[in-house]
Amino acid sequence: MSQPAQAKVNQPMKKEKVSSPWRDAWRSFKKNKIALVGTFIVIFFIFIAIFAPLLMPYEPNEQILLDRFEAPSSTHWFGTDDFGRDILSRVIMGARISLMVGFTAVIGSIIVGSLLGVVAGFYGRWIDTIISRIFDIMLAFPSILLAIAIVAILGPDLQNALIAIAIVNVPLFGRLIRSKVLSVKEEEYITAARAIGMSNFRILTHHIIPNSISPVIVQGTLAIATAIIEVAALSFLGLGAQSPDLDWGKMLDDSRAYFVQAPWTMIFPGLAIMLTVLGFNLMGDGLRDAMDPKMKQ
Amino acid sequence: MDREPILEIKGLRTSFFTDDGEVPAVDDVSLYVHEGEMLGIVGESGCGKSVTSLSIMGLIPSPPGKIVDGDILYQGNNIVNLPEKKMRAIRGNDIAMIFQEPMTSLNPLFSIGNQLIEAIRTHQNVSKKAAWDKSVEMLKLVGLPRAEELMDDYPHQLSGGMRQRVMIAMAMICEPSVLIADEPTTALDVTIQKQILQLMKELNQKLNTAIIMITHDLGVVAEVCDRVVVMYSGKIVETADIHTLYKDPKHPYTKGLLASIPDLRKKSEKLYSIPGNVPKPGSITEGCRFAPRCEMAFERCFQEDPALYPCSSDEHEVRCFLHAPEEVKP
């Protein structure tokens, strides 16, 4: 018993205590209970999305016409809709589609937005002027209106809704990373890196991008929540998923007419949207607290 | 004077182009440093010390800055307007620089070892292992204890003094022949200052690196430098070897600077300070730039700009009409 204790004293804090800034952020994130709840919700929905085919009790498009508008029961936990389709199965399938669309759209806009933002912030001058003005113009439209316009041009389906939402979010990330790059660029370690003869490209990839990325991670988490709402909104308006495809927004749209008669047709997909968005928001807030150096004690 | 200086600046003029026109931050500065020599550049804030050093490194932010005139000769070759790629090969490898703020001069996201290895591999095509060994050796050379463990540490885990040692290690790792130290001790407390200065002197003697020490603190210069250049408002006002400057300062500005060092042995009511502030670069176009603050100024000082006049000992020069040779005097 005393042997290992001795060994520990003799080799004080070697590998285990190395605290990188990322690890510090994780440590403070872990302490944030509400953020952990949010993370749990997010993981729960991701789990459902991944294993959707195994979890669905029925085929989501299977119509049992004898069971139309059945209230939640032991056979249909969330009830059935106007075609006798099992709502639980549809919510589970909807999780897969909504999350996938949300993630893909946000990742797409992060990639494009960051690229433009880094170029604008780092190289400045006319290239910055052009990119920033394009962002300004895009941000002058209410995002959902711009998304509707883009879908109108591309044609209404889920994939185009995804593209529209990705495009709408590009200036959000572009501006964020541009402003961060502008401030990181002036840091003394950048001058120091230049003074040891590092090339612009290497400074960009090794110093500027890693130091500018944390607000993007935070904003990305929050943006997934918004993207899920936006996809749902587009589908609700009939511009996203088209039958027989489904997502949560489409389910809301389909059951709009029967809300009084069969409220469960709307409550469960609505609840799913709300919970997912809440989860991402709580997690995003926690990430921000953990990663913002100004809030560190 | 038969030795060829390792670095020589001739008539350097670096300007910033603003909405109000050209503002010369460094105006006609000439200086040199020999191999293994320690040169001090002294002056108040805004006198052009840092712009001079950034000009040497080719790191003047452009626009708005630009080297308008003059040559910077490194080993006899002009490095002004060298293509960026060639300049990069010189930076860090031949001429290195350390900065005032050790707290912000290291990338917070990478370990010390990572950054040192990066510095070596920027210039030398060596294996990671070799770079690692060299880094550890360098950390030991700058007097850091437990060098191997430090390699895995992150900048925020080190104190200011330790970080400055790491910065020095990083600057010296490619064995440059010139090291520019821009106020390396200003941000450190006094006891650490002394250690860092000693370290730099040691490295200077051990590795024969020429060091240009930029500071506003004449005490720092007295401690380590061989020769001093005093700058005021973008111009050199006096240059001399360290003993001459302290024993026999000629320029009223140098005298003022020396008088404003607090003397702990004397108990005086008030500390001396030179009245007024450093003029904004470009604001004085006529006469000696120090004249408005000078107690000895006379009419001519406001009309003509004095040249650098040689004094008794051959390396002592001063920009003041009081010390002008007879034939220049009216």
Image: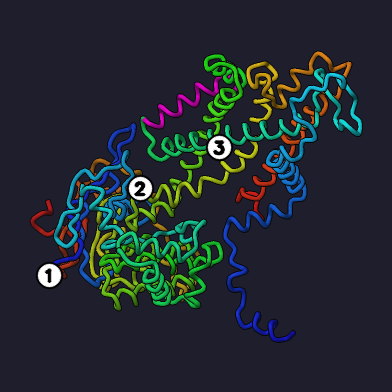
Q: Which label lies toward us, 3 or 1?
A: 3
Q: Earlier in the sequence, mark 2 or mark 3?
A: 3
Q: Are marks 2 and 1 in contact (CB under 8 Å)?
A: no
Q: Which residue is mark 2?
A: A200
Q: Which residue is mark 1?
A: B1
Of residues B124 and A58, which is closer to you in this image?
A58
Instruction: Measuring from the top left, give residue B268's x and y in whole percent.
Output: 48, 68
CA gap, disc 2 and disc 3: 26 Å
Residue at 38 percent of width and 31 percent of height: A127
Of residues B187 and A234, which is closer to you in this image?
A234
Look at label 2 and name its amino acid.
Answer: Asn
In the image: residue A285, left or right of residue B156? right
**What is the quadrant of the C terminus of chain A in the image?**
bottom right
Chain letter, disc 2 residue? A
Q: Which residues are magenta?
A: A127-143
Q: Eyeballing the image, is B118 above or below A68? A: below
Q: Which label lies toward us, 2 or 3?
A: 3
Residue at 42 percent of width and 74 percent of height: B136
Q: Quadrant of residue B201?
A: bottom left
Instruction: Measuring from the top left, give residue B188's x and y in whole percent.
Output: 48, 65
CA gap, disc 2 and disc 1: 40 Å
Q: Which label lies toward us, 2 or 1?
A: 2
Q: Which residue is mark 3?
A: A107
**What is the quadrant of the N terminus of chain A in the image?**
bottom right
In the image: residue B197, left or right of residue B312? right
Chain letter, disc 1 residue? B
